[in-house]
């Protein structure tokens, strides 16, 4: 067998036939070039037949050294030990001339079956695949519980094989009520185009500021949409509110409640007193919303937006952005419901929420994100983690141990100086 660079057609045909992850797609390679990686579309060929493939991203390090990252690993039959050994052997030969320190992979393969508390239970496991990777020379890295790795190690995967009614039955009662709340708040969902990516980026900046993280700039999202949209692999969802309709609706609700309140005003009974308290509470809520809308221009605005990727028979909710000034209207719930429904109608088999935490009973600031994604009834899934194939032990030690220590010392010094 020979490891060769595949042309676009060869690569796309093989990854499509073998139901590869979108991070193994030809398009993700184009995005990776934009992010500064050198990209290789490699295939292991037996004569003219492709047996395995890999999207290899090369990152330059100091002193001419590099490392390879293969997002979500090879497209290969991991249970075929001989094929896996051949792929790794040929990849090591390919890496020799490029001063590669190590090769990292993170297969999107389920480790074992877990319950809602992340405890291992009886069911499917892939411990044999972990052993196969170790046997061909990979080092299994620490199993993380948060977002420390290149890709999420935990997620929820929503199966879309049943009827839409069955899918929506798995939604939590809170989810269903919040979808209704969004609809009653004059929210609706539209599909955006390339001209709407800037609006998505604006919301993403708000999200980054609120959650104290950095994602990508507007140019990245525009490039991402352009590349994946060529083959209808991306959909931009826009959750909107008609502020004029919402204002008019709230005013009418306020009038009705005031009439009810006045009708009960002179009737003194325990039942009516409780009813009046409930009306007072609702009036305060409506008045607060009206006050928030008072100085807003009466127009349609975008308050929630999602970019989802569709590849082969799966979809991933890759990027999400929300304006939290309107969080009590729960427009993001309506957007999420819409994209799941659309994927079902398009014949997508699995909807992946693309990442959650592996410690649902801890005190992480990400528990809110976890609870939101859990509410849609997906299977809580733990992947097998990251693996490194070490080609230069000395430089690997420097890169993975000494350089991080140095960076931590510099960061502490900078923080002290700023303080």
Image (cartoon, helix red, strand yellow):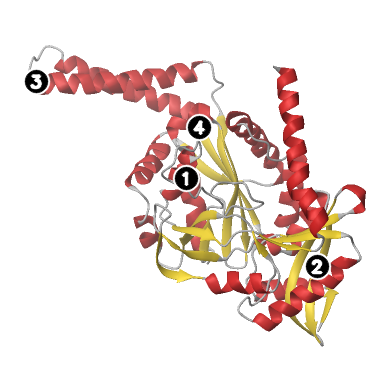
| Residue 10 in sight | no
Picture coordinates of residue 122, whole percent (x, y): 38, 68
Q: CA distance from mark 4 to mark 2?
A: 47 Å
Q: CA distance from mark 1 to mark 3?
A: 41 Å
CB within 8 Å, label 1 to label 4: no
> Residue at image x 78%, y 78%?
44
Badge 2: few (under 14), some or many (20 or more) residues near its Cα, within 10 Å?
A: many
Frontmost residue, 416 versus 296: 416
Q: Label 4's element? A: strand
Dot in front, 4 or 2: 2
Indicate which disc, 2 or 3, sits on the residue closer to the N terminus.
2
Dot in front, 1 or 4: 1
Indicate which disc, 1 or 2, sits on the residue closer to the N terminus.
2
Indicate which disc, 3 or 4, sits on the residue closer to the N terminus.
4
> Residue at image x 44%, y 41%?
362
Q: Which residue is mark 4?
A: 242
Q: Which residue is mark 2?
A: 41
Frontmost residue, 306 versus 18: 18
Badge 4: few (under 14), some or many (20 or more) residues near its Cα, within 10 Å?
A: some
Q: Image quadrant for the C terminus?
A: top right
CB within 8 Å, label 2 to label 3: no
Which circle marks residue 270 in the picture?
3
Determine which quarter of the picture holds residue 227: bottom right
Q: Is residue 331 left or right of residue 102?
A: left
Badge 1: few (under 14), some or many (20 or more) residues near its Cα, within 10 Å?
A: some
Badge 3: few (under 14), some or many (20 or more) residues near its Cα, within 10 Å?
A: few
């Amino acid at each position: 067998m020979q490891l060769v660079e595949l042309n676009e057609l060869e690569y796309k045909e093989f990854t499509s036939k073998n139901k590869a992850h979108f991070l193994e797609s030809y398009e993700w390679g184009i995005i990776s070039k934009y992010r500064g990686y050198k990209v290789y579309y490699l295939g292991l060929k037996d004569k003219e037949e492709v047996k395995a493939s890999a999207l290899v991203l090369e990152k330059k390090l100091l002193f001419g050294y590099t490392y390879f990252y293969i997002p979500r690993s090879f497209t290969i039959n991991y249970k075929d030990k001989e094929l896996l050994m051949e792929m790794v052997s040929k990849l090591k030969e390919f890496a020799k001339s490029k001063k590669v320190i190590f090769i990292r992979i993170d297969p999107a393969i389920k480790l074992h079956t877990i319950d809602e508390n992340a405890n291992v239970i009886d069911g499917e496991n892939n411990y044999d695949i972990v052993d196969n990777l170790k046997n061909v020379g990979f080092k299994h890295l620490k199993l993380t519980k948060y977002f420390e790795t290149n890709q999420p190690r935990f997620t929820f995967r929503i199966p879309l094989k049943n009827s839409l009614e069955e899918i929506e039955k798995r939604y939590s009662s809170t989810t269903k009520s919040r979808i209704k709340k969004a609809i009653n708040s004059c929210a609706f969902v539209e599909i955006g185009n390339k001209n709407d990516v800037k609006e998505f980026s604006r919301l993403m900046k708000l999200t980054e500021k609120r959650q104290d993280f950095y994602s990508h700039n507007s140019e990245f999202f525009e490039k991402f949409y352009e590349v994946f949209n060529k083959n209808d692999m991306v959909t931009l969802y826009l959750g909107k509110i008609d502020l004029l309709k919402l204002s008019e609706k709230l005013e009418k609700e306020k009038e009705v409640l005031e009439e009810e309140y006045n009708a009960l005003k002179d009737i003194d009974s325990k039942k009516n007193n409780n009813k009046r308290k409930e009306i007072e509470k609702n009036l305060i809520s409506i008045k607060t919303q009206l006050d928030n809308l008072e100085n807003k221009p009466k127009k349609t605005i975008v308050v929630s937006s999602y970019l989802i990727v569709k590849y082969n028979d799966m979809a991933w909710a890759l990027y999400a952005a929300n304006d939290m000034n309107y969080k009590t209207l729960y427009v993001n719930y309506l957007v999420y419901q819409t994209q799941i429904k659309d994927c079902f109608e398009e014949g997508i088999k699995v909807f992946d929420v693309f990442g959650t935490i592996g410690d649902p009973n801890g005190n992480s600031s990400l528990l809110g994100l976890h609870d939101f994604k859990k509410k849609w009834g997906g299977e809580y899934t733990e992947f097998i983690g990251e693996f490194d194939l070490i080609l230069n032990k000395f430089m690997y030690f420097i890169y993975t141990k000494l350089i991080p220590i140095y960076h931590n010392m510099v960061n502490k010094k900078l923080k002290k100086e700023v303080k």
